[in-house]
Amino acid sequence: MVFRLEDIPKRDDREFCSLVESSRRVSKFPGIYERSQTAPSPAPSSLRPVDPLQEASSQRRAPYISFGEQGTTATAGAYGSLLRTCRPISKSKSPNGFPHSGIVGLEFATTKPWFISGRANNILENSIDADCGFGLKVRNDLSSDPPTVKFAEGRWPVIKYSTKEGFLVTVRLWCQQDMVIQHMHVLNPKLVTGEKPKLRISLDPNFTMQDLDYLREKENEPIRYYRGMHHHGIIAMQSPSSNYDEKPSDTKELASVLVGFFKGGASQELLWEYAEDERKTQSRIQPIPIAHYLGRDESVEFSVAFKIHTTTLDAHWRRFMISSEEVIFDPHPPPLADLAIFETEMSWYLYRNLEHIMSVCSIPLDLDSLDEASSTPIDRLKNHGPTIALTSPGGYYDILSRTEPTVRPIKPIALTCGDFGDHRVSVLGS
């Protein structure tokens, strides 16, 4: 299958080369491994599931991790592979009615959103399997020690584990606007005699696209995989028809997923083949093998970015690639809040729960897509806004009220239901 775009630049085109070869971006905040004075940072937690018979006070070791930013969220397994990513899509940008729920989901499993409990079980079972998930996976034999996790400034997961050869693997995960990035750093600290040991990695870009509608039993969305420009990246497009061979309209807005692959911050070409069991309604790609030889104290970095957006087939070629200048490869998030209280473990729980609510459960709502309804502006209410009466444990009484109009409009958000690690797939609702 060939994705034919108009006006594709030549391989040596100056603009194309600048996007592919652009320098590595670094954020402006303090180093990701530096401990913040305000963010609690206890010892790394093992991702091995907790025995129910252990003491109730032991820290939870859920084998999956959720994270997000501004509506783009993801869940990863114990070894850093992605099990699910989600992003809200404005209905004004999807005239074909997809997604009806307003949220596009990419799922490793194929269970439809209607089966909420089954999806939750899939996450739990797949999260402890190093072979499950999409994205980058280490194919060397892993050591028996369980992976550990810490959170950069209480936000982005940093997972560490090792292989039997002694490779030290660090997987960092974060969201950046409409992208989910998985970054893998591998170090060989051991003395090498003879040939350098071989690091074996695979990039598995196969996922299921879903409309996260929990109220209707809908089939998973058929998608097609295409090769990126000059083999840079992969393009997964929503198939607008059940007829796999039908050519979609050039002007119809479709959900699309861009997959970018980087080594040391530079975009890399991807050579891949379709899976032999390709179905007429769902294309699949053979996992792409990646090899690298590491001597003593040598390291290598690989990154993969998944970008969910909508586009048309007649859009500019720039809409169909992720350049290295778009990705911030060293994100240093600012502290979410000051929770420097006395109990370190309690502070960690408060911080992680606050972060989960603020960045994973919250979905910003598009005002343009909401039904118009008459309402009283908040600044025309009595006392210029809501009044809150507070009584402290010591008996003190205070009243909080806003006396000045809001200068900046407050955008509404929706809170989705989830738990401490997973999100948008709870039996309690959504």
Image (cartoon, helix red, strand yellow):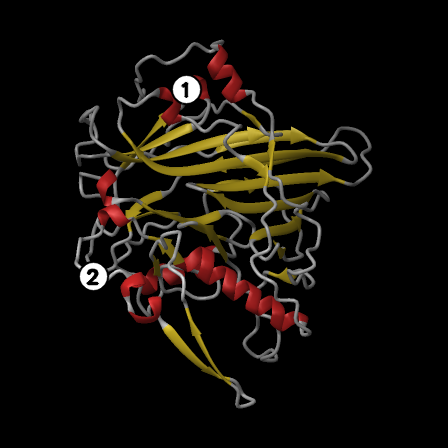
Position of the N terminus by quadrant = top left
Q: Nearer the viewer, residue 212 or 336?
A: 336
The answer to whether one can see residue 204 in this image is no
Residue 266, quarter of picture: top right
Q: Residue furthest bottom?
A: 395
- Residue 218 drawn at (x, y percent): 20, 51
In what quadrant of the picture does the C terminus appear?
bottom left
**Residue of label 2:** 375
Looking at the rendered structure, the secondary structure element under dot 1 is: helix
Indicate left or right for 346 with 377 as reference. right
Instruction: State whether residue 80 appears in this view.
Output: yes
Kind of residue sitting beneath label 1: Met
What's the distance in space between the residues labelled 2 and 1, CA to CA?
49 Å
Rendered residue at 30%/67% (across/down): 429
Element type at marker 2? loop
Name the residue rendered at 46%, 11% in the picture.
Answer: 11
Residue 405 relative to residue 241: left or right = right
Compared with 148, 333 (above or below) is above
Viewer-nearest of labels 2 and 1? 2
Mark 2 packing: few (<14 Cα in 10 Å), some, or many (20+)?
A: few
Q: Is residue 181 left or right of residue 341?
A: left
Q: Is residue 148 left or right of residue 107?
A: right
What kind of residue is marked 2? Ser
**Above or below: residue 64 compared with residue 314:** below
- Which of 190 and 356 lies nearest the eye of the viewer? 356
Q: Which mark is residue 229?
A: 1
Seen at 41% across and 19% down, the residue is 229
Residue 376 position by quadrant? bottom left
Q: Nearer the viewer, residue 364 or 418?
A: 364
**Residue in the foreground of this view, choosing between 403 and 191:** 403
